[in-house]
Image: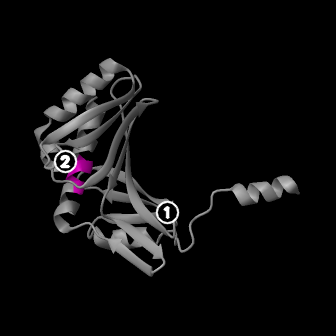
Amino acid sequence: MIRHLRERLLAPRAPTGYRPGATLGLLSRNLGQVQMHLLEPARAVLDNPAQGWRAEVRECVEAHLLMHVVTCEFHLCLPALQGGEVRLELRHAGAIRRTGLACVYRSGDKARFIQARDLLLSNAQLTAALMPLDFKRLALECRDGHWWLTLEHMGGSEVVNRMPAFRRYIQISPPQRAHLMACLGLFGESLPRL
């Protein structure tokens, strides 16, 4: 009984006021013509048959004192051309203004990282789509013969405060939506070649 009580009290819980799927519903309307299908309350699939990619979208909840933030992460899983494990991140370079893209090594095979970095940063279309894209995190991982991409956009998120009580959805603007869809499509083309 004590064990059950301890597990119940220490288990991670969703913050008060969190509504699973509410942010995904707002994001679905915000993305316009792209087809989104709900799999679970906090997980959906985006289909873009014209560009030939399919991405999973998940709500991620981050609790703070008297508030929480719900963000949406876009995930792509694509086959890798060759084996080897590597983890890397892409981010904007420049302290005040964006001056380019930086590829940061996290772990794994260094030769594989150099190969991936060179291919991604030399892709002019991908760079042109990523430069204006407002993303918080863009992580790439190669493992088990697949590339796993995680992209967290600054838009498509919801801020919920308990005191004073308010709830605000931060939408993805039409230009940002176009850049996001272009990035997902270009990663869908580029990653299987690595």
Q: Nearer the viewer, residue 14 or 49?
A: 14
Magenta span = 180-185
In the displayed image of the protein, which residue is found farthest to the bottom? Answer: 165
Residue in view at x 41 percent, y 77 percent? 167
Q: In this view, does 50 lie above or below 82?
A: below
Left or right: 111 with respect to 92?
right
The x, y position of residue 42, in whole percent, is 50, 63
Left or right: 181 with respect to 141?
left
Looking at the image, how many numbered discs can be counted on the residues?
A: 2
Dot 1 or dot 2: first in sequence order is: 1
Q: Residue 130 carries which label?
A: 2
Local crowd size for mark 2, using a 10 Å CA cut-off: few (<14), some (14–19), many (≥20): many
Local crowd size for mark 1, using a 10 Å CA cut-off: few (<14), some (14–19), many (≥20): few
Q: Which of 115 and 170 is in front in this view?
A: 170
* Type of amino acid at the residue the image marks with label 1: His
* Type of amino acid at the residue the image marks with label 2: Leu
Tag 2's secondary structure?
helix
Residue in view at x 57 percent, y 72 percent? 16
The residue to which callout 1 is attached is: 64
Is residue 47 part of the magenta span, yes or no? no
The x, y position of residue 34, in whole percent, is 29, 64
The x, y position of residue 56, in whole percent, is 41, 54
Residue in view at x 23 percent, y 52 percent? 51
**Cα distance between the residues tagged 1 and 2:** 29 Å
Q: Is residue 24 above or below residue 119?
A: below
The x, y position of residue 19, in whole percent, is 52, 72
* Image color mode: one colour
1 vs 2, front mark? 1
Q: In this view, does 103 lie above or below 19?
A: above
Quarter location, residue 160: bottom left
